[in-house]
Image: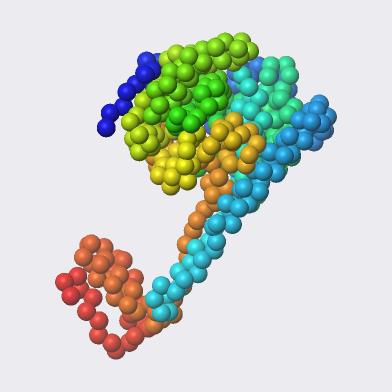
Amino acid sequence: MTREYLKKATLTSATGASDVHETVVQILSDIEAGGDATALDYAAKFDRYEGNVMLTPEEIEAAAALVPDKLKADIQFAHDNVKRFAEAQKATVADVEYEVVPGLIAGQKAIPVDAAGCYVPGGRYSHIASAIMTVTTAKVAGCRHITACSPPRPGVGVAPAIIYAAHLCGADRIMAMGGVQGVAAMTFGLFGLPRANILVGPGNQFVAEAKRILFGRVGIDMIAGPTDSLILADGSADAHIVATDLVSQAEHGYNSPVWLVTDDRALAETVMEMVPGLIDDLPEVNRDNAFAAWRDYAEVILCSDREEMAACSDDYAPEHLTVQAADLDWWLGRLTCYGSLFLGEETTVSYGDKASGTNHVLPTSGAANYTGGLSVHKYMKIVTWQRATRDGSKRVAEATARISRLEGMEGHARAADVRLAKYFPGENFDLSAEG
């Protein structure tokens, strides 16, 4: 099978990427050593904001008063949807108790992490939905303490709608601090915060690099790159809707890839003709990003049939995957690599990004090959336990002793030996590796 590229990307997400590693390492090191004062110094430098870092109840109430009632209702609607879906996800993880062999019982428990740090972008766009997605799922998971951290705007502070959303969704503290310094404050437990056990949420390349460096000391949701989206469309698709959906995702950033995979040349050509005009019609602040993303990173791929289309999609492992084609059940059963799937033109990635209930913090840059996105499960530790009767441990002890000796781990073997000797005195066991 062959794939014909009607439009080929000239750049990749790695092209021209800045090496920010050393900068982030230095900032993290400085803040860990210098604590609150150093974090405030970096906040003054990068956020250009010298207001209150930890918002007071009065400041939260004042911010909420600035949010229009209609927007409050929309935020509440989105929160309710995300909360209900997160509760349904949590219900799929149950504590388990199972008798592996007679007398030996093993179990599973799902335990939420203690403290979650939720980063909410607030630079070019005010990511209200990110506050909903990250804080709500942490709350449903049962985290004892949730910090929402968002960069303030110079002389203004955190966007009131972000503050309102974070508070509504259950944040215990809301911090007006962005970038590496905000991530560091949550990780190191500055300003009276508990040390975060997990860091979640999207951010710029500095935030992403900070999370990558800190991973191991803390958990993270994933290492995120530029957002990406792929549409699978056949001849039944509405070209205007396909083109509009591609443009809607291209506006995320200048390096946000969008891909169209189709088996219909006429559809592909029509979409390619329509996209530039749709981009031109965007407000200027959105237009530049969408134009650069379409020019440099977008691809349009013509395949021979739907099986080749599905295989192409799985190869790309997109963050967002939309199907606008016949026989949606076939696609649902066939596709295997994506962050979140949107079936039919009646839904769109924008719904998932904002209000439909599934999470918008998703794997990028092909990571959907091996992981899913943020969910209530990311905040939960699936741990195991076991107990046994003496009779139940007998066969396990014998196997443990012999396997351990074969591996050369005599100490392990003797931990089994002493139990056999205590529980079954007078019995002879062949516990040698060769036995």
- The residue at 51%/16% (across/down) is 275
Q: x, y percentage for residue 112?
A: 58, 52
Q: Quadrant of the N terminus?
A: top left
For residue 164, side relative to residue 296 (left or right): right
Q: Give the quadrant of residue 117.
A: top right
Q: x, y percentage for residue 305?
A: 35, 34
Q: Nearer the viewer, residue 21 or 423?
A: 21
Q: Nearer the viewer, residue 267 or 92?
A: 267
For residue 435, above or below residue 426: above
- The residue at 72%/22% (across/down) is 157
Q: Quadrant of the C terminus?
A: bottom left
> Which residue reaches farthest left?
434
For residue 389, above or below residue 410: below
For residue 201, above or below residue 100: above
Residue 35 appears in the rendering = no
Q: x, y percentage for residue 132?
A: 66, 37
Q: Nearer the viewer, residue 171 or 295?
A: 295
